């Protein structure tokens, strides 16, 4: 993931801690490498909102979640290269 990132919050995996966050979906290495459609989708399977501030990816994807990044219980969050390409 090179430049911009997006967050898409909507309304299961690898556990990212005792807070119920799982990696729900990974899309990488698209057939057309010019398409900026790679993404990682997180899901909060827990019963409480989770503050992701300071959480980070550092292998294959480099991103640190900013202060105030909250993933509500039962919701999804997508980290992607280009929001316009992923939302289509």
Image: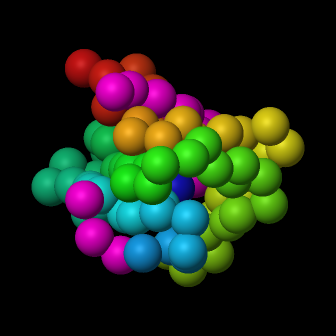
Q: Is residue 11 left or right of residue 52?
A: left
Decide: is 4 above or below 84. below
x, y percentage for residue 64? 73, 58
Name the foreground residue: 77 vs 83: 77
Q: Where is residue 24 in the image (x, y as percent from the top left)?
A: 29, 58
Which residue is painted at 38% across and 26% down in the image? 10
- Residue drawn at x 60%, y 43% is 49
Is residue 4 shown in magenta? yes
Q: Residue furthest left?
A: 31
Q: In this view of the protein, can residue 42 be seen by the observer?
A: no
Q: Which quarter shows the C terminus?
A: top left
Q: Which residue lies furthest to the front in this view?
A: 47
- The residue drawn where x is 84% and y is 43% is 67
Between 11 and 3, the one nearer to me in the picture: 11
Where is residue 19 drawn, in percent x and y?
Answer: 56, 65
Q: Give the range drawn in magenta.
A: 2-14
Colour pattern of the rendering: rainbow
Left or right for 65, reference 39: right
Q: Nearer the viewer, residue 88 or 53?
A: 53
Viewer-closest of 64 and 54: 54
Q: Is residue 14 above or below residue 46?
A: below
Q: Please check the rendered image and state whether residue 80 is part of the magenta-colored stretch, yes or no.
A: no
From the viewer's perspective, is 60 left or right of 88?
A: right
Tell which residue pokes out farthest to the right in this image: 67
For residue 46, which quarter of the picture? bottom left
């Amino acid at each position: 993931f090179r430049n911009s990132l997006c967050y898409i919050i909507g309304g299961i995996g690898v556990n990212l801690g005792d807070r119920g966050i799982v990696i729900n979906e990974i899309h990488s290495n698209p057939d057309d490498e010019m398409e900026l459609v790679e993404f990682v989708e997180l899901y909060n399977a827990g019963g409480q909102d989770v503050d992701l501030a300071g959480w980070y990816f550092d292998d294959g994807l480099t991103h640190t979640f900013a202060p105030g990044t909250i993933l509500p219980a039962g919701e999804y969050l997508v980290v992607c290269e280009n929001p316009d390409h992923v939302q289509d």
